[in-house]
Image (spheres, grey):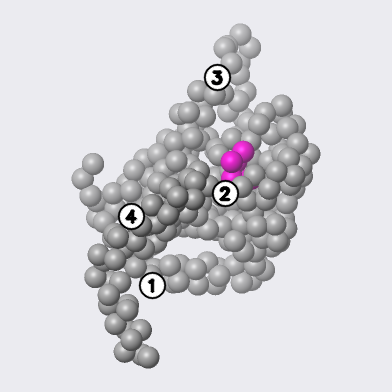
């Protein structure tokens, strides 16, 4: 698709804003704690397609409207009339949640989750699929799949274990435990938890920090770090060499070096 210089905001379940390359994507079904609906899935697919080809994109911030981040799947849409066939949940994942989290991982800019309230089920999975997660201390992360006889999805079986280890991941999933933002930060599940009154300022600080760094370096770092868990040591060394070669060709690198030397 051709590059774009404008983003649409004609959505029913999303709010999309942009300022100097920083795009905020806000899930907006506040009356349902921003739970996923069919319409939201369709709109997210469209919005992310536009964001991917947006000229000058530097950063994506994902957050929720109102008092919640995202309550996961809207179970009202799982209400099936008597006599109608039940949906194949595996196919549903392949068509909705899996492509969504893959897109976030492949986006060549940092993706910041600003978790302003409850993040449950696929909503928690969505937050953990982002590169940097900042939450209010009182935010709640919960994976209540075991109550329904399901397993965590949207990548959470991977992100949970890698972030907090096997023992904690097992308990969080099987017991359906609620993890506060403060606990999540202490356990390494997220980057940082802050008081409610400091939340907006912390997100702004993070945005300013990232946008003041060379974009190519952040893109290559993101690519390298996500490959690290799967690569053996020698493969990762080779990837580092390839990425550093690209980074070293960036004129901004040499400008930064010269700035450092001039200061010194």
Q: Residue at x 65, y 64 (%)?
A: 193
Q: Which residue is mark 1?
A: 212
SS of the residue at dot 2?
helix
Q: Quadrant of residue 211?
A: bottom left
Find residue 213 and report its image quarter. bottom left
Residue 56 position within the rendered picture, expressed as x and y whole percent measured from the top left: 28, 60
Q: Position of residue 147 (x, y in %)?
A: 75, 32
Look at the magenta stretch and give its main secondary structure.
Answer: helix
Q: CA distance from mark 2 to mark 3?
A: 25 Å
The earlier-in-sequence mark between 1 and 4 is: 1
Mark in the foreground, 1 or 4: 4
What is the x, y in percent for residue 192?
62, 64
| First in sequence: mark 3 vs mark 1 | 3
Which label was assigned to residue 128?
2
Q: Position of residue 16 (x, y in %)?
A: 41, 53
Q: Earlier in the sequence, mark 2 or mark 1?
A: 2
**Do the residues bearing badges 3 and 1 touch, measured as CB atoms within 8 Å?**
no
Q: Nearer the viewer, mark 4 or mark 3?
A: 4
Mark 2 vs 3, N-terminal side: 3
Residue occupying the far front of the picture? 234
Which residue in the protein does label 3 denote?
88
For this orientation, the residue located farthest to the top is 83
Q: CA distance from mark 3 to mark 1?
A: 45 Å
Q: Residue at x 50, y 72 (%)?
A: 205
The quadrant of the image that shows the C terminus is bottom left
Q: Does residue 67 appear anywhere in the picture?
A: no
Magenta stretch bounds: 156-160
Which of 16/218 is in front? 218
């Amino acid at each position: 698709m051709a590059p774009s210089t404008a983003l649409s905001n004609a959505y029913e379940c999303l709010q999309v804003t942009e300022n100097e390359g920083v795009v905020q994507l806000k899930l907006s079904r506040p009356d349902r704690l921003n739970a996923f609906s069919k319409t939201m899935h369709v709109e997210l697919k469209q919005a992310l397609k536009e964001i991917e080809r947006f000229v000058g994109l530097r950063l994506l911030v994902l957050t929720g409207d109102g008092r919640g981040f995202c309550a996961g799947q809207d179970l009202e849409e799982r209400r099936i009339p008597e006599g109608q066939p039940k949906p194949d949940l595996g196919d549903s994942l392949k068509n909705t949640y899996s492509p969504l989290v893959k897109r976030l991982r492949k986006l060549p800019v940092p993706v910041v989750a600003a978790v302003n309230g409850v993040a449950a089920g696929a909503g928690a999975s969505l937050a953990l699929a982002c590169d940097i997660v900042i939450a209010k201390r009182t935010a709640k992360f919960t994976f209540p799949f075991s109550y329904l006889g399901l397993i965590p999805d949207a990548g959470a079986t991977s992100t949970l274990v890698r972030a907090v280890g096997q023992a904690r991941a097992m308990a969080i999933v099987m017991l359906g435990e609620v993890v506060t933002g403060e606990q999540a930060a202490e356990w390494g599940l997220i980057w940082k938890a802050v008081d409610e009154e400091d939340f907006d300022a912390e997100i702004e600080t993070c945005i300013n920090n990232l946008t003041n760094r060379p974009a190519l370096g952040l893109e290559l770092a993101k690519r390298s770090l996500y490959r690290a868990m799967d690569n053996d040591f020698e493969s990762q060394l080779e990837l580092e060499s390839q990425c550093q070669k690209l980074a070293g060709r960036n004129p901004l690198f040499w400008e930064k070096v010269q700035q450092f030397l001039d200061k010194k």
